[in-house]
Image (tube, rainbow, N blue to C red):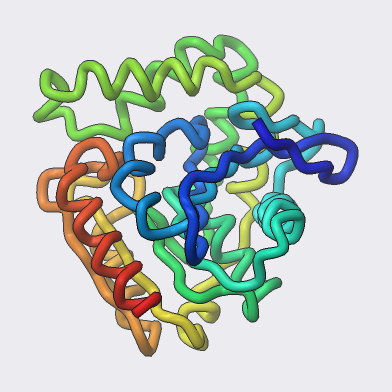
Amino acid sequence: MPLVNFKQGKINYTIHGKGRAIVFLHGFLGSSKIWETYIEKYSSLYKIILIDLPGHGKSDCYGYIHTMEMMAESVKSVMDSLGLRKYILVGHSMGGYVALAFAEIYNDNLKGLVLFNSTALADTNEKKLDRTRSINLVKRNKGNYVRGAILNLFNPDYYQFYVDDIEFAESIARSTSQRAIVDCLEGMKNRLNREVILKFANFPVLFIAGKKDKVIAFDTIETQSRLAKSSYLCVLPEAAHMGMFEEKPNSQKYLYRFFGMVYK
């Protein structure tokens, strides 16, 4: 697998297909593997780039707070190494936070942005306390934390239908080191509010939101979708925070339409 030097470590990525570029960024406790079932859908038309964010998958952990800005820089390092200047970023959850930080720093490189179960809001004080409690739990028992965290991402009304997906997501999360989990929790806890990025975005923005999401309230995403001049809100009525698994056909359809519109 290709690796790019970044700071004192390496970032892992894979490339699939040819054409105009689309970059997929996974969420917290994930890896580029969560998007692998999407490759076949799009790689016949586009160059699909899947990146393991720092501390996840096969990318190195950097041993300090993984800020959204630092992770955005790691994405830019990959794209620069490929000689690509314009692309669409698709960010799930934490990947969306990274994509927004990227948009703030490297605005000229964005052709379009997808926030998949993600938000431009910073953590509330209550959420910051939750992150701190999570950090303490991870340090005491990473396994228990991972199991509870993954289950919380899916709609409990349909657990029986997601058994394989839950196990898949949990297996990826279990491979994430304790250090990386803590570093990313700290980074998310201290991230900035980036609603202004949406307000002044000079590229189209797609929001894909789960109506049953317990991690990021649907109402807040609906409100943010009105900020961008060129924005689109697609609702997954039965999905929680893992829409790419919970409502895969609809998710693929919405992404396909957006890519086609941006790259028409």
The N terminus, quarter of image: top right
Question: Residue 133 placed where, x, y %?
Answer: 54, 29
Question: Residue 167 placed where, x, y %?
Answer: 33, 16
* Relative vertical location of residue 238 with respect to residue 228 in this rendering, above or below: above
* Relative vertical location of residue 220 with respect to residue 143 in this rendering, above or below: below
Residue 220 visible in the snapshot: yes
Front position in the image: 188 or 31: 31
Identified at 65% across, 19% down, the residue is 178
Question: Residue 75 placed where, x, y %?
Answer: 67, 53
List the single residue furthest toward the right. 8
Q: Tell me the quarter of the picture where residue 51 sits.
A: top right
* Relative vertical location of residue 167 with respect to residue 55 in this rendering, above or below: above
Determine whether, in the image, residue 116 is placed left or right of residue 32. left
Determine whether, in the image, residue 258 is placed left or right of residue 238. right
Residue 182 visible in the snapshot: no
Determine whether, in the image, residue 4 is placed left or right of residue 30. right
